[in-house]
Image (cartoon, rainbow, N blue to C red):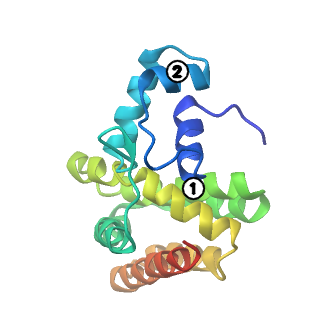
Amino acid sequence: MNQERTLYEKVREDILNGTFDKKEKLTEIKLAKMYDVSRTPIREVLKQLEFEYLVKDGYVYTPSPEDYRNLFEMRILIESHAVEKAVLLFVEEDLKELRNYIKQAKDGDDSLTLAANKKFHDKLVRAIRNPFLSETYDRLNSTIYLFSRTVVQKQRPELLDEHEKIVQAIEDRDGETARQLIVTHLQKDLEFTLYYM
């Protein structure tokens, strides 16, 4: 499925693919010319990428492995809380939606799998129903995308099996098991991706 990527997705992808030199200042004028757009949308994209820890002071920000571990610690805290809430709040329709994302991920190419993987985790986080925690999670978008892309493209073993076990634990109303499963799942994502960085 070759859907048109947004300007934000194009710039983010180019940053993650190393298109820009780390010492190269990402000016609005330069990027507007490069992507053939006006400066206004570029300004918005840069704000978003700075919000997500991908750009800092106008330069590509490359977190260290320790930075990534710290960012993932925040993600793990949020998502482990989310599954505990999901155990209490999710109904059959929610579980069906999660299983549908797993099916899409299994049946699709890398881009579809990546999109379905994001929808799966976003759905879990929505169970929190806390706008402050949701905003904190949104700040991790670029980091999550980088890691998700690696685990999908490099085909981390048991990735989708783990999703199925998480959904089963939610359906069984087993909060402790669901929490342990999501923590292990995300820790595996972290270690797998850091290995390839």
User: Is 72 on the left-hand or right-hand side of 33?
Assistant: left
Label 1's element? helix
- The residue carrying pointer 1 sits among few (fewer than 14), some (14 to 19) or many (20 or more) residues within 10 Å by Cα, namely some
Locate residue 113: give its quadrant. Answer: bottom right
- Asked if residue 129 shows in the view, the reply is no
Residue type marked 1: Glu
Residue 119's spot in the image, x, y percent? 54, 53
Q: Are marks 2 and 1 in contact (CB under 8 Å)?
A: no
Provide the residue designation for mark 1: 97
Q: Kindly report the distance in space between the C-alpha atoms of the residues bearing marks 2 and 1.
A: 39 Å
Q: Nearer the viewer, mark 2 or mark 1?
A: 2
Is the C terminus in the top left, top right, bottom left or bottom right quadrant? bottom right
Residue 3's spot in the image, x, y percent? 72, 35
Marking on residue 1: none
Query: Number of labelled discs?
Result: 2
Label 2's element? helix
Residue 124's spot in the image, x, y percent? 42, 60
Task: Please name the residue shown 30% across and 50% down the image.
Answer: 134
Task: Please name the residue shown 56% across and 29% down the image.
Answer: 7
Looking at the image, is 80 positioned above or below residue 46? below
Residue 17's spot in the image, x, y percent? 60, 52
Looking at the image, is 84 positioned above or below residue 144? below
- Asked if residue 75 shows in the view, the reply is yes
Is the N terminus in the top left, top right, bottom left or bottom right quadrant? top right
- The residue carrying pointer 2 sits among few (fewer than 14), some (14 to 19) or many (20 or more) residues within 10 Å by Cα, namely some
Provide the residue designation for mark 2: 32
